[in-house]
Image (spheres, grey):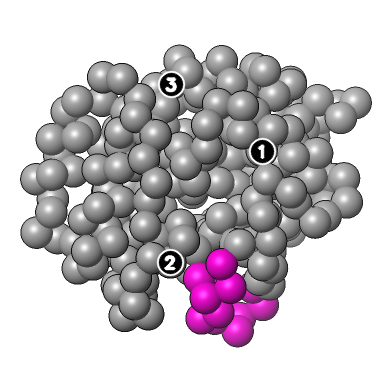
Amino acid sequence: MIRVPTPELLDTDAGTPAEIAASLNDLRRINRWFGGTRTSIDLIRRVASDDGASGVPARRPSPDVIFPPLRLSLLEIAAGSGYVPQTARNHLAQKGIRLDVTLLDRVASHVASTPKNGTAAVVADACKLPFCDSSFDLVSSNLFLHHLGPDELVHCMQECLRVCRKAVLINDLIRHPVHMVLVYSGMPLYRSRLTRHDAPASVRQAYTKEEMLDMLRRAGAARIEMKSYYLFRMGAIVWKRADG
């Protein structure tokens, strides 16, 4: 299946406020029902327990030792409403991992309804991050990188690696003919006409795991861990070089 770049309507808010809100709600349901949230939670937990790339020994469970909560700062780029990182934060808090979340989106209306629960929101371009080097422990991307062409994606990842201290987390789609069939089968679930256009467009321009790995290597990652998740999701941990 050849990759076909296709503009998505939600990227430019090409709809009424009600249609945009319905499309953001569709994305929440897609992430909740089809593994998007679980993928991000798993990636964050894997970073939190890693004993190699970060240089910090993993905290092994022990009946005799009580650890304080682990605290990580996370920047979510192209965050939309921020449903995935905020849900991950609430889940991980029960596992002893405290996540300080900052949402970034270039469209102000997408983050305007961010709950006032300590989550920060910034309006900016995900490929021109307005932060100093190593400002966050983690930078995360959920269903965004497939919007970018290969050279744009490499540049965006270089920016994300610059801004993070530990790793960049990627949660995205895998392009596959069966995935396209599933997307069209799910049309009755979509409430917004924007989603009915954008869902198949996303699969058409998504990358395969092999393509993504090649671009991540070009971005200068120290180490890349990638695996497949439920219903054609890929999850990747892109570790930052110690001298980066």
**Image coords of residue 145 (percent x, y):** 51, 39
Q: CA distance from mark 1 to mark 3?
A: 17 Å
Q: CA distance from mark 1 to mark 2?
A: 22 Å
Horizontal placement of 56 versus 15: left or right?
Answer: right
Sequence-earlier tag: 3 or 2: 2
Q: Give the residue type at disc 3.
A: Lys
Q: Of residues 232 and 11, which is closer to you in this image?
A: 11
**Image coords of residue 130 (percent x, y):** 80, 56
| Numbered label attached to residue 156 | 1
Residue shown at 30% from the left, 51% from the top: 198
Q: Nearer the viewer, mark 1 or mark 3?
A: 1
Pointer 3 local density, CA inside 10 Å: few below 14, some 14–19, many at least 20: some
Q: Quadrant of the N terminus?
A: top left
Q: Give the residue type at disc 2.
A: Asp
Sequence-earlier tag: 1 or 2: 2
Q: Is residue 194 above or below residue 182?
A: below
**Circle 1 SS class:** helix
Horizontal placement of 73 versus 28: left or right?
Answer: right
> Which residue bears the numbered disc 3?
209
**Image coords of residue 25 (percent x, y):** 32, 69
The answer to whether one can see residue 99 in this image is no
Span shown in magenta: 107-119
